[in-house]
Amino acid sequence: MIGESVPRLEDRPLLRGEGRFVADISLPHQLHMRVVRSHAAHGTIESIDATGALAVPGVAAVWTGVDVSDIAPIDFRQVGADQMVPYRQPILAQERVRYVGEPVAVVFATDPYTAEDGAEAVILEVSELAPVLDTTGPLGDFDGRLDTEAYVFTEQTGDVDAAFARAEHVIEAEFGVGRHTGVPLECRGALAVHHRTTQTLEFLGAAKVPFQNRDALAAMLGLPPSRVVLREAHVGGGFGVRGELYPEDVLVALAALRLGRPVKWIEDRHEHLVAANHSRDQRHRLRVATDDSGVIEGLEVEFVSDQGAYVRTHGATVATLAAAMLPGPYRIPNYRVTGRVRLSNKTPAGTYRAPGRYESTFVRERALDAVAAELGVDRAEIRRRNLIAPTEMPFERGIDALGTAVVYDSGKYEMMLDRVLGHIDYPALTWSLAERRAAGELVGLGIGFFVEKSGLGPFAGSRVEVDPSGCVTVTTGEASVGQGFETVMAQICAETLDVGLDRISVVHGQTDQMSYGMGAFASRATVMAGTATHDASLALRQRAIEVAAEMLEANPADLELVDGAVRVAGSPTRAVSLGEVASALGPASPYADGRPGLVTEEWYLTSHMNYPYGLHAGVVALDADTGSLSIERYVIAYDIGRAINPMLVEGQIVGGAAQGFGGALFEDFSYDEIGQPQVTTFMDYLMPTAAEMPELEILLSEDAPSPLNPLGVKGAGEGGTNACGAVIAAAVDDALDRPGAVTSLPITPERLHALCRSSPATA
């Protein structure tokens, strides 16, 4: 089963129209919540008048910040620091509003339409203050005491100053990546109910990190964690945006407790675009020191990450990941980076597919292109001269990411470079593109390496149980956001127990089914939960053989597990099925020996992440008159150590590339001079469609299995996104015959049109 492209098990109910998303779930006597949001980017709250809302028939309650002032701000889940604590977000605005879309009040009513009518009747009076919109400029005022720089950090390896002092060449540049977000198909939502008989708060619609959100909710609401149950249903995409603990989630849970009725909230797309986490939005200044051959001896970077109005659950995750992963697959012995997390009067930011790496890959690969242009060296060759060799693995960076030391576990980067260059016939392709440019076409090639991180620990658990019918249930505390998690877990279990996929069911994301869980983020699910499932399946296999040996009066060494049955090797008629073994392990059975049931639970622990890597190459054609860009060819090579299901990996790569192209060419959250968002519908927020997507050529490799887990697997979810911006930018430079033309993303049609008009190639 491992390595087979079997169809996704989770697609069956979706294809039959039997999907169960949180919007599909309703409970008797439920109330519906509607959020009243700030219309101002920055200001002091003068008054909130709920009189009109309370007069609307069907409105049960209206809350403002005063009503929930006893609830603490939402705490950090990752990469928190004392310096950032005052910048956390309250569940309803207190005294000030800090971005358009910030929750200032909530209305509860008997149906969603009445709740919306009630929300429109709430009158908010704000004395507006000047907004901070440019985080590279002067710092602003956060609350009368603090400025808008929430966190500053510096990481360094080697002697950077000495490297620059002896350098033959020093190249300086500035780069930026704009603000965009994941835009999952399913908007956020939640349904909470307080069961008085059990004194349990049940929260439906959990995603991504149900156990961590359970603990956070319990702490904020003053409940024991055992009395808070989060349940994951189907999830219409995550991409880092869904599943974090937002103000609306806490309000729904609190209302269920206080109002004594189930409370449901489903956001609309306008709310999602102004209130759910944005991401990216970084500005980098850098210096590169090289010798005469282009070998990088030093790299110094300073960047600003626009965090938006508050520091949410991710803390400084995006900024610290950008810093840690910026060197990529290159040796770079001397490296210093300073990151500044600053606040603005925009929607708060968090993680989004390849957080920090999309930005830093763009910056690094643009810098490599600049070095190649400065020294007159071929772009592929300049990369080859700086790649870390396989003999240097494991390669210690000397810096940390997400609380773990960055140590590349395995990688054959030069082999991948040769594979891609051979696949595209690099000499012939560059020659043909030059010929086309000479004939007046604006066509170009870009290439870009990346290194990803995956398999974040420290733990994941899995329980595997066989019932008397022979059916197998895999239960894990990890989560699914639609990436094929159930299928992959079932394949790993089926491989070990030699049973059909139709006999396996996978339970995940239910906090009352396991004691612990971390969730689906950081490309960790297959690595962590997969390894735990593999270990639990091996343990169950061994247990089944030991018990079957007693049942068959045979030596365990003579037994094998084939087609879901334990049999004597060479004597297939002497066999007992796994179901029969499970039946024989009742509590009073002599075979049980105090361990009833055919069930095992194993936990996989790790202190290090592992590091998949890849290389993108793309050919683009520009239209100078319209500013349009078409991707003629795009290749993504990705090494993930071992592919459990290659078809699902390719699906992840294609989906990731679509989001990478969106960030490179279309998607951009812009604001006017008073902080009003200019992108609040899909009329404004442009995303790639099937018409803009090229036919991707995917080169999936397994040349560098991870030595950190028995399956050799690495994460596969983010490599399709990572290098898209860098490659498209390089290809535009090449098409315009203008190195360094593209210094920021996205390259919207307007920006591309301006570049074309100012380029010598179009004169």
Image (tube, rainbow, N blue to C red):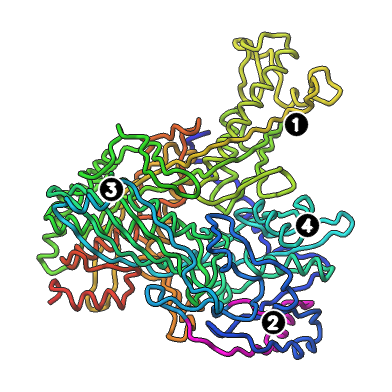
- Image quadrant for the C terminus? bottom left
State which quadrant residue 744 falls in. Answer: bottom left
- Location of residue 657 in the rendering, given as x and y in whole percent from the top left corner: 40, 57
Give the numbered dot on residue 116.
2
Q: Which amino acid type is shown beneath numbered disc 1?
A: Ser
Left or right of 617? Residue 106 is right
Q: Which amino acid type is shown beneath numbered disc 2?
A: Glu
| Residue 655 seen from this side | no
- Location of residue 222 in the rendering, given as x and y in whole percent from the top left corner: 77, 60
- Observer-nearest of 611 and 150: 150
Left or right of 97? Residue 258 is right
User: First in sequence: mark 2 or mark 3?
Assistant: 2
Q: Nearer the viewer, mark 2 or mark 4?
A: 4
On the image, numbered disc 4 is attached to which residue?
223
Give the numbered dot on residue 469.
1
- Indicate the secondary structure of the residue bearing disc 3: loop
**CA gap, disc 1 and disc 3:** 65 Å
Magenta range is 102-131
Q: Residues within 10 Å of mark 2 (few under 14, many from 20)?
A: many
Q: Nearer the viewer, mark 2 or mark 1?
A: 2
Task: Name the residue at 68% across, 62% down.
Answer: 22
Give the numbered dot on residue 159.
3
- Indicate the secondary structure of the residue bearing disc 2: helix
Pointers 2 and 1 in contact (C-beta within 8 Å): no
Q: Is residue 327 above or below residue 460?
A: below
User: First in sequence: mark 1 or mark 3?
Assistant: 3
Give the numbered dot on residue 674.
none
Q: Residues within 10 Å of mark 1 (few under 14, many from 20)?
A: few
Q: Which amino acid type is shown beneath numbered disc 3?
A: Asp
- Location of residue 696 in the rendering, given as x and y in whole percent from the top left corner: 35, 54
